[in-house]
Image (cartoon, helix red, strand yellow):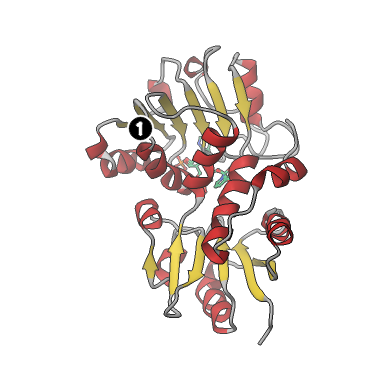
Amino acid sequence: MSEVDRYAVIGHPIAHSRSPVIHRLFAEQTGQLISYGAMDVRPEELDTAVTRFFGEGGKGLNVTVPHKGEVARLVDALDERAAQAGAVNTIYVRTDGTLGGDNTDGHGLVTDLQQNLGIEIQDRRILIFGAGGATRGIVPVLVDSGPAELVIANRTLEKARLLELQFASSGNVAAVRFEDLTEPFDLVLNATSAGLKGEEAPFPSDVVDSHSVCYDLAYAMQPTPFQVWARRHGAAAAHSGWGMLIEQAAESFRVWRGVRPDTGPIRAALAPDV
Ligand code: NAP
């Protein structure tokens, strides 16, 4: 068996993933001896790939599109934030040898918003475009941060309605259609995959004014289509999801290794100033 603890990210496709370089930098910074690879796993290979990885002594997996929901049934126990999200992005080996599933996406987003960017969540009116896996991961953590209102707008209204129902007890989560939106928000999050293929972003411009801060969960080496859209409509700021990516990775690293990397130098090294 290898002496170096093995980790990897699984997804399909996976070639674009920045996780191996982020975790290599975390390991160098914290002096942890690990290896971290990228595995292209098709949906029909998911069960076999996960079982084999841990059967061969692997210590942890990150999970990305399209497996975050499916992989939840392959672990022995879900942490609360994974259970609430119905999605797992981090698998780890528990002390009794069984597998735990966690979700660090919401933690990554809120850390980037509050600590890195100084953006308030408490008592703010927040809009999320999209109701897919990423939204399921971030809504529980956003609700915990005490927004005045959390509106989820999705092309397929039913998916947003399920989240509204799940968080009904918080009393301030609402599902709407894009065309129902007529007023500006303090914080506008894009958690859709719309626009990534170069198509025009389908969002109503009324949600943005000169006080609105916009944040795209997507990230690229150049401004994303949502950042371009937000700036064109006069938003106060338009950030991309690089910081979230690095913060969710740091939280996975902490779950696995018990050590929290300092993300500042990693953000400075990797995230373009766009
Ligand atoms: P997903 O589960 O596939 O959900 C996609 C969402 O986009 C759905 O709400 C879908 O609406 C919507 N959508 C897609 N095309 C659209 C269009 N043309 N018009 C309007 N809505 C459209 O994907 P996901 O896992 O949630 O990921 C969403 C984004 O978040 C991706 O860009 C991903 O890279 C990013 N992300 C970033 C991080 C990070 O660390 N920075 C972490 C997680 C995710 P329907 O429900 O109507 O299909």
Amino acid type assigned to the residue bearing label 1 in the image? Gly
Q: Position of residue 131 (x, y in %)?
A: 43, 41
Q: Residue furthest bottom?
A: 1
Q: Which quarter of the figure has residue 60?
A: bottom right
Could you tell me which residue is drawn at 46 percent across and 49 percent down? 133
Q: Position of residue 88 (x, y in %)?
A: 46, 59
How many numbered dots are placed on residues in this image? Answer: 1
Q: Position of residue 166 (x, y in %)?
A: 28, 44
Pick the residue in front: 47 or 54. 54
Which one is in front, 250 or 260?
A: 260
Q: Is residue 146 left or right of residue 224?
A: left
Left or right? Give the position of 57 relative to 153.
right
Residue to which mark 1 is pinned: 146
Against 185, residue 248 (above or below) is below
Q: Position of residue 17 (x, y in %)?
A: 68, 55
- The quarter of the image holding the C terminus is top right
Residue 17 showing in the rendered view: no
Q: Nearer the viewer, residue 221 or 29?
A: 29
Q: Quadrant of residue 35?
A: bottom right
Q: Residue furthest left?
A: 169
